[in-house]
Image (tube, grey):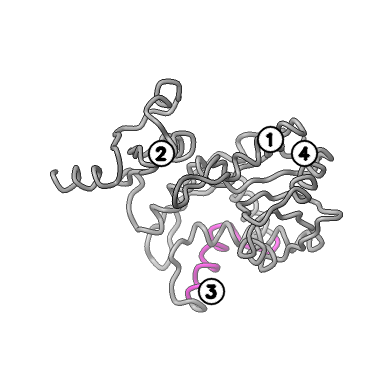
Amino acid sequence: MCELYVKADPILFESRSRSLRIRGVVTTLRLENQFWDILREIAEVDGMTTNQLITKLHEEVMELRGEVENFASFLRVSCTRYLAQRAPDAKVALFGTPDLESEFLDHGFRLDMDAPDYIVLGFDMTTDYQRLSRLCDLARAGLPYIATHPDINCPVAGGFIPDIGAIMALVRASTGRDPDVIIGKPNREIAAMAAGKLGLPLESLCMVGDRLYTDIAMGQHAPIRTALVLSGETQPDDLKTSPYRPDCIFSGLGELVAALKAR
């Protein structure tokens, strides 16, 4: 079943921008092609053009909420809710926090470890050997496998604890499988969402982080400027072999702040 996702046409997860007029103002929206296709499908069902549908959604959410902090994210959520309604019996084996479980339940999915349709791996400090074994069993069975982010370690007071990337490595060693989809960094759309929420042009942002393979990689994919801080996971020697090169390197946030004040 996972071949359905792995062999998807790459153009589906490429992003493209589209300009339209909302409340008399020309607005540019950037979404992955897959989401544009879903919006077109919803519009056709309702007898509208895609632009008419987006304008209607904006008007209705403004009337209900009074504001929309990130309209592109709202459209993505609308698409996921539409898909969930198309498959109201979709069952998810979710390995994550109670908050993540609540998000999935709120979007119409059912949580089922016995006979799921999908696997979703999130950060979960409550996991145990039984749950890890179940995760590997489901991955080995070929179910669609999604991860929220690939970070290997999570910084905590006094050091690090294993993050999702470490669990992904365990699953790979046991089953030979990697996630079919990773949603978070280094997905470049995270930067676009941040720019939209802040109301700033994408090129004005700088990604600051301590991981080359997620933070700096996302910045390069966006593309935006990047600053690496060596106060977390990355060590200086890691730069010698990494394909991801930050624009600036600082020993920590203190040095970065001092450099900004000196400008």
**Farthest residue toward the top?**
240
Magenta region, main secondary structure = helix
User: According to the image, label 2 marks what residue?
Assistant: 219
Q: Is residue 110 visible?
A: yes
Dot 1, how many residues are within 10 Å of its Cα: few (below 14), some (14-19), or many (20+)? some
Residue type at mark 4 is Cys
Give the number of the disc on residue 37: none
- The residue that appears at 65% across and 35% down in the rendered structure is 169
Q: Earlier in the sequence, mark 4 or mark 1?
A: 4
Q: Secondary structure at mark 2?
A: helix
Apparent side of residue 163 relative to residue 109 in the rendered image (left or right): left
Apparent side of residue 164 relative to residue 21 in the rendered image (left or right): right
Spatial CA distance of label 2 from label 4 is 29 Å
Residue type at mark 2 is Gly
Give the number of the disc on residue 2: 4
Residue type at mark 1 is Asp
Q: Nearer the viewer, residue 263 or 90?
A: 263
Query: In the rendered image, which quarter contains the C terminus?
Result: top left
Spatial CA distance of label 3 from label 2 is 34 Å
- The residue that appears at 30% across and 34% down in the rendered structure is 249
Mark nearest the camera among 4 and 1 is: 1
Dot 3, how many residues are within 10 Å of its Cα: few (below 14), some (14-19), or many (20+)? few
Q: Earlier in the sequence, mark 3 or mark 1?
A: 3
Q: Earlier in the sequence, mark 2 or mark 4?
A: 4
Spatial CA distance of label 4 from label 1 is 11 Å
Mark nearest the camera among 3 and 2 is: 2
Residue 15, relative to residue 96: is it above or below? above
Give the number of the disc on residue 60: 3
Q: Earlier in the sequence, mark 2 or mark 1?
A: 1
The stretch in magenta equals 45-62
Spatial CA distance of label 3 from label 1 is 40 Å
Mark nearest the camera among 3 and 4 is: 4
